[in-house]
Amino acid sequence: MRWHYKLLLRLRSIFDKDQAELDLSEELQFHLQNQIDEYVAQGMNPKGARHAAFRSMAGIEQAKEECRDARRVNVVESLIQDLRYGLRMLRRSPGFAAVVVLTLALGIGAATSIFSVVKAVILSPLPFRQPENLVHLREGHEHYHRGDQAYFSSARPGSLYDWREQSNSFESITAYRWRPRLLTDNKPADLVVAQDVYDRFFETLGTPPQLGRTLQANDYEPSAPHVVVISNAMWIKRFGGDPGVIGRRISLDRDSYEIVGVMPPGFYPAPDYSELWTPHWADQAEKDNRNIWGVYALARLKPGVSWEQAQRELDVISARVLQDHPTLDSVGGIVVIDREQLEAAVAACRRSHVAAADRLRECGKPGVGASGRP
């Protein structure tokens, strides 16, 4: 029997039960009568043939139950009966029903949030080229932990260029600075979170733009026109997802910038979210500066180089710089494996779970209803 024919029989048994039962009875009576006629033809009297036919079929009602089980009708009927019984019980206790519904909602919400975090952080790869080779470079004292955390969150410009010039463990080293910018165009002004990025920023991350292009080498020249790359969120919120946004001009801190690119959704090169990226040009005075902080360095390890090998090389560079500049603070470069996105996501997930548990406990207090009010 083909599957679609079986499906039609099962649907008919559920939605046209009376006719299906009548057809089943007629079919079993037909088989019973054929069995009686066969026994009579063998020489048995009609009464004995009838009893023998009933015994061979093990009873009409039992045969009907076997047919219903084969069609999975009993399973569906039991489920419907259980649902009806559950609904009747919930109607009799509306307060209990509200607590049950709220508990299920909180449980489903918590499970969904956990899966969203796991999918975004673990199952879905980061939107960068070979993200396992990306690391942060920070500065900290030698007694701080290495490899997975550092207590100094930034570096100095002079250290950045020391690493660039003297290290061989990295394919490229870049950096960014946080900078709030006042955005104005034909809409109300808005203070946005921006990053001034050093050269090879987008090349190091290896994420292609969704629209237009990223920053190029000539964009970092001191006389280059002002250009900006915006995030997908800003593109949708501020410009309505207009594909013609490339080439449009906006004002940042009263300077005119041309939009040259839009990054795809999920592009988060730092734990905190940036809405746009502008090129940063460093003059020689900044490259030699070893006193100010605020540079956040990103690097890509060369293929086959571990972070431990890169760390040993940074130790050598730090000792050499300290020998050349004995008046500097005794701090060294630290390679930080980029786990901050996972930690931030898990922390946010934990906060939501604690809040959900608190709401659930409030609902379970005596004299408190499903709305959380006495």
Image: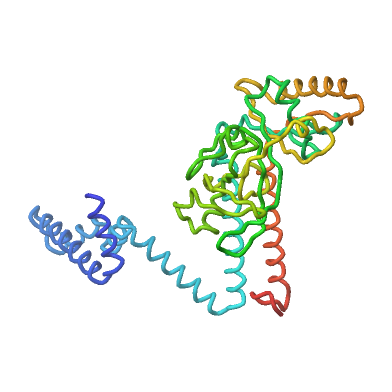
Query: Is 57 placed above or below 90 here?
Result: above
Query: Is 257 placed above or below 34 here?
Result: above
Q: What is the number of callouts on the image?
A: 0
- Which x, y percent locates residue 321? 83, 23
Residue placed most toward the observer, 207 or 221: 221
Residue at the image position 26 percent from the left and 69 percent from the top = 16
- Please indicate whether residue 72 sits to the left or right of residue 109 in the image: left
Residue at the image position 73 percent from the left and 28 percent from the top = 161
Residue placed most toward the observer, 90 or 268: 268
Protein image colouring: rainbow
Query: Is 10 placed above or below 93 here?
Result: above
> To which quarter of the image does residue 67 belong?
bottom left
> To which quarter of the image does residue 291 belong?
top right
Question: Which quadrant of the rendered structure holds the C terminus?
Answer: bottom right
- Please indicate whether residue 342 sits to the left or right of residue 10 in the image: right
Residue at the image position 68 percent from the left and 40 percent from the top = 176
Residue placed most toward the observer, 127 or 60: 127
Query: Is 366 placed above or below 114 here?
Result: below
- Which x, y percent locates residue 274? 64, 49
- Which x, y percent locates residue 210? 48, 44
Residue placed most toward the observer, 283 or 244: 283
- Please indicate whether residue 90 sits to the left or right of residue 297 in the image: left
Residue at the image position 57 percent from the left and 69 percent from the top = 101
In the displayed orientation, state which residue is furthest to the front.
223
- Please indicate whether residue 79 sits to the left or right of residue 16 in the image: right
- Which x, y percent locates residue 229? 57, 45
> To which quarter of the image does residue 80 belong?
bottom left
